[in-house]
Amino acid sequence: IKDWNGIDQVVVRNPQGSSVKVSLYGGQITSWRNEQGEELLFTSSKAIFKPPKAMRGGISICFPQFGNCESLQQNAFARNRIWTIDENPPPLHPNDSHGKSFIDLLLKPSEEDLKFWPHSFELRLRVAIAADGDLVLISRVRNINGKPFSFSFGYHTHLSVSDISEVRIEGLETLDFLDNLRQRERFTEQGDAITFESEIDRVYLSSPNVIAVLDHERKRTYVVRKEGLPDVVVWNPWEKKSKSMTDFGDEEYKQMLCVDGAAIERPITLKPGEEWTGRLTLSVVPSSFCSEH
Ligand code: TA6
């Protein structure tokens, strides 16, 4: 199907009826629905599908840089490029238990890209919807360069929540974090679960591989499982910042929370021929499930 800018989007559905939609613009995930057809990702009503920026919502693929501390543009360029579909994806790895409902997208640098990031790579994004409705994203970066290169990476994930003040994150307590609102200074999380009452933009470091986002009002929990992605960015622009963003509604901060599996603090270095894998699995479970297990 075409999005409103004429760029192809692909819908992958499992036999049970859950689905994921991915745009060839940026390899961005623009929708994830459960069997009942309910949308689980946030997309702004003011989102714009147009280069040079990523669409405000869903899940954007941030590579070769996540954040804005270096020379590349914030969250870098993979999410602003047109990707291609791999019609002959490699066979499933024995550990890839996501089933047959998937698509592989590919990104290679253009001549233009190589001028400001002179490293040849292949980025393969597998987008899968498992039999139980889990969304599985597997990114593989391969160095096809003569020299080593380093990068950071993030799945910039906009979760749809009922009301931000009813939400808490479990799994990040006692961790160190870099505070993007205070020149990336390093602090240690003191409290219990993380709750929200003002703007937040933090990189939690060396986090566990499973964290939970509990939505008290909807009585459901997003479970975020990740591999190869030690860090987690937590972002909500809150009231004032929302008003300054042209592609975001003034009140929409209440209905979304970004929880991004990422590799930021320690960049990944690949030698020629080497490959890195970063895997993210998102599930939604009733909240009672989490307290029982
Ligand atoms: O959630 C990651 C993050 O990069 C935050 O640090 C914050 O700056 C936000 O996303 C906005 O990024 P964007 O480039 O999508 O406008």
Image (cartoon, rainbow, N blue to C red):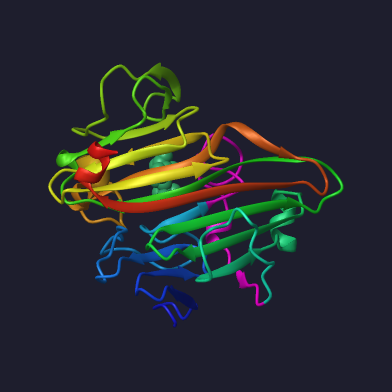
Quadrant housing the N terminus: bottom left
From the top left corner, tell me how far across and down residue 171 is, in percent. 36, 31
Q: Residue furthest front?
A: 292
Location of residue 54 (image quadrant): bottom left
- Is 191 magenta? The answer is no
Q: Residue at x 59, y 68 (%)?
A: 104
Q: Quadrant of ligand 1?
A: top left
Q: Residue at x 38, y 59 (%)?
A: 58
Q: Residue at x 54, y 49 (%)?
A: 279
From the top left corner, tell me how far across and down residue 289 is, in percent. 24, 45
Q: Is residue 119 visible?
A: yes
Helix, strand or loop: magenta stretch: loop
Q: Residue furthest left?
A: 217
Q: Is residue 70 above or below residue 130?
A: above
Q: Horizontally, is 84 left or right of 274 in the view?
A: left
For the residue pair 252 and 166, the one nearer the viewer reads as 166
Location of residue 41 (image quadrant): bottom left
Residue numbers of the magenta segment: 62-87
For the residue pair 192 and 66, the one nearer the viewer reads as 192
From the top left corner, tell me how far across and down residue 17 is, in percent. 34, 75
Q: Is residue 56 above or below residue 204?
A: below
Q: Residue furthest right?
A: 146
From the top left corner, tell me how far across and down residue 132 is, in percent. 38, 62
Q: Is residue 27 visible?
A: no
Location of residue 16 (image quadrant): bottom left
For the residue pair 170 and 143, the one nearer the viewer reads as 170
How many numbered marks are there?
Answer: 0
- Is 84 magenta? The answer is yes
Quadrant housing the C terminus: top left
Q: Horizontally, is 242 left or right of 94 in the view?
A: left
For the residue pair 287 and 65, the one nearer the viewer reads as 287
Q: Horizontally, is 156 left or right of 230 in the view?
A: left
